[in-house]
Image (cartoon, rainbow, N blue to C red):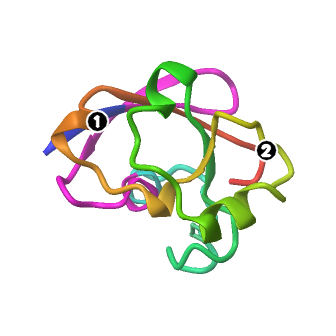
Amino acid sequence: MGTIYVTDLEGEVHKLAVQSGGKLMEAIRDAGFPIEAICGGEGSCATCHVHVPPEWYDKLPKAEQTELDFVEVAMTYEPGMSRLSCQIQFNDSLEGLHIQLTEED
Ligand code: FES
């Protein structure tokens, strides 16, 4: 179990418990945030798009090309910040991770 911090669309920061090995999208959704995740975590819809501050972005596992293909067409795509939260599994190296919800959610 670990902790991440989620900034909502109003700029409020929330502390969230995350299972080791669990997808960030599932933790966000299960905590009741309005994240659509309409493909169920298959990486094919971009409705779980989040922004990751630059100081955390480089600590994430690299995105596969298929993830990049989807996230780059997201409405609020930001190079160097945009990821699909269903494609990121939490591990101890991400303890304290900060992410921001986006308008796609
Ligand atoms: S839930 Fe669809 S891309 Fe992440």
| Residue, disc 1 | 94
Q: Quadrant of residue 8?
A: top right
Q: Which residues are magenta?
A: 5-27
Q: Is residue 104 above or below residue 94?
A: below
Inspect the image, locate mark 2, and give the three-letter code of the amino acid beneath it.
Tyr
Q: What is the spatial separation of the Cα atoms under label 1 and label 2, in whole angstroms? A: 22 Å
Q: Is residue 103 above or below residue 25?
A: above
Total labels drawn = 2
Looking at the image, which is closer to me, 49 or 64? 64
Residue under the point 63% across and 71% down: 66
In the rendering, at what x and y percent does residue 39 appear?
Answer: 60, 80
Image quadrant for the C terminus?
bottom right
Residue 19 included in the magenta stretch of the image = yes
Image quadrant for the N terminus?
top left
Q: Quadrant of residue 94?
A: top left
Residue 13 included in the magenta stretch of the image = yes
Disc assigned to residue 86: none
Mark 2 close to ligand 1, CB under 8 Å = no
| Residue, disc 2 | 77
Q: Is residue 84 left or right of residue 55?
A: right
In the rendering, at what x and y percent does residue 32 appear?
Answer: 47, 53
N-terminal-most mark, 1 or 2: 2
Mark 1 close to ligand 1, CB under 8 Å = no
